[in-house]
Image: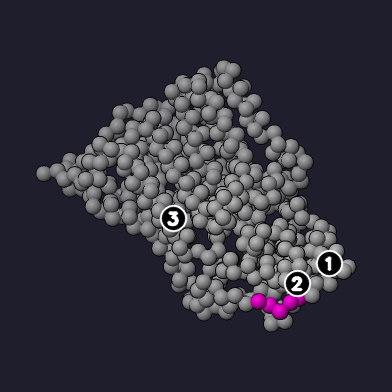
Amino acid sequence: MRFTSLLVELLRARPRLVFWLVTLLFAAVWLTLPTVFFSNPPGDVADVLAFGREHVLGTDLGPPLAFWIADVVFRATGEHMVGIYLVSVLCIIAAFWTLFRLGQLIVGAQQAVLAIILTATIVPFGISNLEFGPSVLAQPLWALVLLNAWRVVGLGRREAWFALSMNAGLLLLTTPTGFLLLGLLVVFMLTTARGRRALASLDPIYALVVVAVMLLPYLVFLARSDLVLPTLIKGMHGWRDVLARWPEVFGWLVLTLGGVALLSLANSGRLSSDPEQAPVIYRPPVDPLARLFVFFFALAPVVVASLLTAIFGYQDVVGGGGLLLLVCGLAVIVLAGDLIYLRRQRLLRVMWGWIIAAPALFVMGTLFVQPWIGSSEVPTMIPASDIGAFFGDSYQRRTGQPLTAIAGDPQLAALIAFSAPRRPHLLLDGAPQRTPWMTTTKFGENGGLVVWRAADTAGTPPDAIARRFPGLVPEVPRSFQRYLNGRQPPLRIGWGIVRPRSTAAM
């Protein structure tokens, strides 16, 4: 007798309901974890907030859209980090929903849900999406580009050109990787008959005009800036180094698909003694162009971006794993065939649950175990709010003015820049070209706070900081208890005040 679980029956009858159950469960895990356990935002979120408050047209980190959104959300939520975590989760939900809609057009709603279930197991969609920034915001925008591109190319809907142009413009205002992804889209359209037919009209010209108008301010910034080209050239490797590095980057991306591979293996018919007893998820035959479309955008971004990462010597893969692997779950479903048998349903449910929970458990293990067994600091355990409140209050007590600028150790300075009252401007004094809104001269005139990690109880500043701020008088270092110290010593921060010249003259 064939056994079919309630979940499978729901998948057949109410695929959208199953989609929302899966997506909201996934989102709840990654919203709860940082909100409850992080006392400091992960990754480069502090830099994103510091850059976003300046509302500049671009930085060396890329186009401005993600930074502006981060600043608006942070202000709107009373400067609580929960707003940033929430917008990250909303980006995941929007990306999954758009991918589900694309899957509906290609493989039908039921198998589209299976694609989302697989996509949720891809590692970068969990851990990396805690770090709101260009790579996170780009995921739903890239999904929208693919959805409307398929409407244009595969379904021949000319009215989708306008939506495609808007999505493309927003993607280019979010991440430099957008130029790569849209270039691949143009390659796909030029190399397919229906793609060339879609291009043989005035619609692409109008779309190009829309994109150009949206990008004009950022393009002016790029033309006047000297940040982009030096950043690209500085890390370029020779071909031998590229050949050695590229397999490592590509292999890491493939490794993050381990959850997809495990579920596919557990559902393999070769391991079943009676495959005909398994319930079947059916789809109509897939358009050959749709098959090519999915496979192309599952493989090409990964190959090209990993190669560029190796060429330019980036530490992190270009664009981020979540952006590059967005279509891989759908590609597995397309490859699986018109009939997908769900074998060993209970085992599949348990495995999926553990695969989803494993990254979250790993993060929690890092938070609570590493302080006891490791020598390296857990960045999310730093008490950001306490540090910001102390230094903001100390500066105002000594100068009679609110803290308006912060410099010194890049990590600590960025942390204070978002957590101190009135959010002081960030100066990266070691690389001042990255923060053009605050020069060393302006810092000296208006005053500010300089911080560093103190190596002794006297709070002697490092030589590099002492050279950049001559005459800086160190204050007594301040120690802070982390969320969990473990075997690590308290965090000791040295600091000194550069008094405003008007105050010094008095």
**Mark 3: few, some, or many residues within 10 Å (few <14, many ≥20)?**
many
Horizontally, is 402 left or right of 307 in the view? Answer: right
**Please, what is the three-letter code of the amino acid marked with disc 1?**
Thr
Q: Determine whether, in the image, residue 418 is placed left or right of residue 449.
A: left
For the point 37% across and 32% down, the residue is: 104
Q: Residues within 10 Å of mark 1 (few under 14, many from 20)?
A: few
Q: Which residue is mark 1?
A: 503
Q: Which mark is residue 119?
A: none
Please tell me which residue is depicted at 47% across the width and 56% down the height of the picture.
127
In the picture of the structure, the residue carrying the numbered disc 2 is: 398
In magenta, the rendered stretch is 474-478
Task: Identify the colour scheme used.
Answer: one colour
Image x and y of residue 50, in percent: 65, 55
Which residue is at the front of the view, 2 or 164? 164
Name the disc covering residue 30, or none: 3
On the image, the x and y values in percent for residue 62 come to 65, 46
Residue at 51% x, 56% y is 82
